[in-house]
Amino acid sequence: MVVLGLTGSIGMGKSTVASMFARHGALVHDADAVVHRLYGPGGAAVAVSADLVPDAVVGSGRDAHVDRGRLGKAVLGDADAMRALEAGVHPLVGAERDRFLRQACRRGVDLVVMDVPLLYETGGEKRVDAVCVVSAPDFIQARRVLARPGMTAEKLGQIRARQMPDSEKRRRADFVISTGLSKGLTWRCVGSVVRELRDCHGHIWPPR
């Protein structure tokens, strides 16, 4: 089974590319969706967040969940709080990731795509066979992100400061897919990556 890491900075079009990989037959694991569940009612990250930012947890009992807007406002720009939160949440995400890979391996899946926004920032490139970076010009990235509700140039700057520069990600990548032109071109690039990887043998999973 080949495990491909898919990453890219905010606003680069990674979600669009992930859906294209799925349409080409790859099994996609969405790290953001996992985090969303962990912060939701009954999620294991609720207790972690309550210890660090009590005001970010709303509801009670089985309905208790994390308001990610409040949580983000509390930790964004506070390096110590961010590190503490990541130290508590990342192991939970890792356990879900490994469970997903075990199930994919048992099913005989030949290509798995791990959609991880902060892949390089968290050392995730060591846990995949190859890395694909989704990229777009800075002005397109900014236009996409600033169109989101509640987003400001200041907030975008803070997010960019936490992420590895796009140029460095592209330098390290095994594959780079551009989303700055047409969706048709992006689709063809994804197909080319899938075809190349289907001729390869993975060495990351199952662990030896």
Image (cartoon, rainbow, N blue to C red):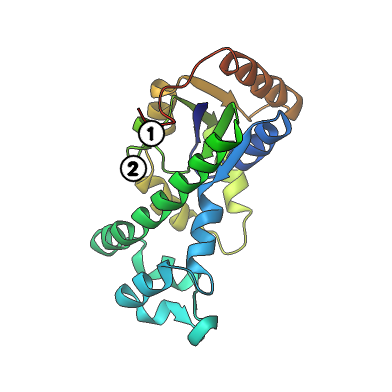
Give the Cα distance between marks 1 and 2: 11 Å
Rendered position, 76 above or below 16:
below
Q: Position of residue 134 (x, y in %)?
A: 55, 31
Q: Earlier in the sequence, mark 1 or mark 2?
A: 2
Between 98 and 72, the residue placed more toward the observer is 98
Q: Quadrant of residue 92?
A: bottom left
Residue 28 visible at all: yes
In the image, what residue occupies the spot 36% across and 77% down?
A: 50
Residue at the extreme bottom: 60
Residue at the extreme right: 184
In the image, what residue occupies the spot 47% across and 48% down?
A: 99
Q: Quadrant of the C terminus?
A: top left
Amino acid type, label 1: Arg
**Left/right of residue 91 with respect to residue 34 in the rendered view:** left
Q: Position of residue 53 (x, y in %)?
A: 34, 75
Amino acid type, label 2: Thr
For disc 2, the neighbor class at 10 Å (few under 14, some 14 to 19, many from 20) is: few
Q: Quadrant of residue 16?
A: top right
Q: Position of residue 6 (x, y in %)?
A: 51, 34
Rendered position, 168 above or below 155:
above
Q: Which mark is residue 36?
A: none
Q: Secondary structure at mark 2?
A: loop
Q: Tell me how many marks there are.
A: 2
Question: Comparing marks 1 and 2, which lies closer to the viewer?
Answer: 1
Residue at the extreme left: 80
User: Which residue is the site of mark 2?
Assistant: 122
Rendered position, 149 above or below 62:
above
Q: Position of residue 194 (x, y in %)?
A: 63, 21
Residue 13 visible at all: no
User: Which residue is the site of mark 1?
Assistant: 127
In the image, what residue occupies the spot 59% across and 30% down?
A: 108
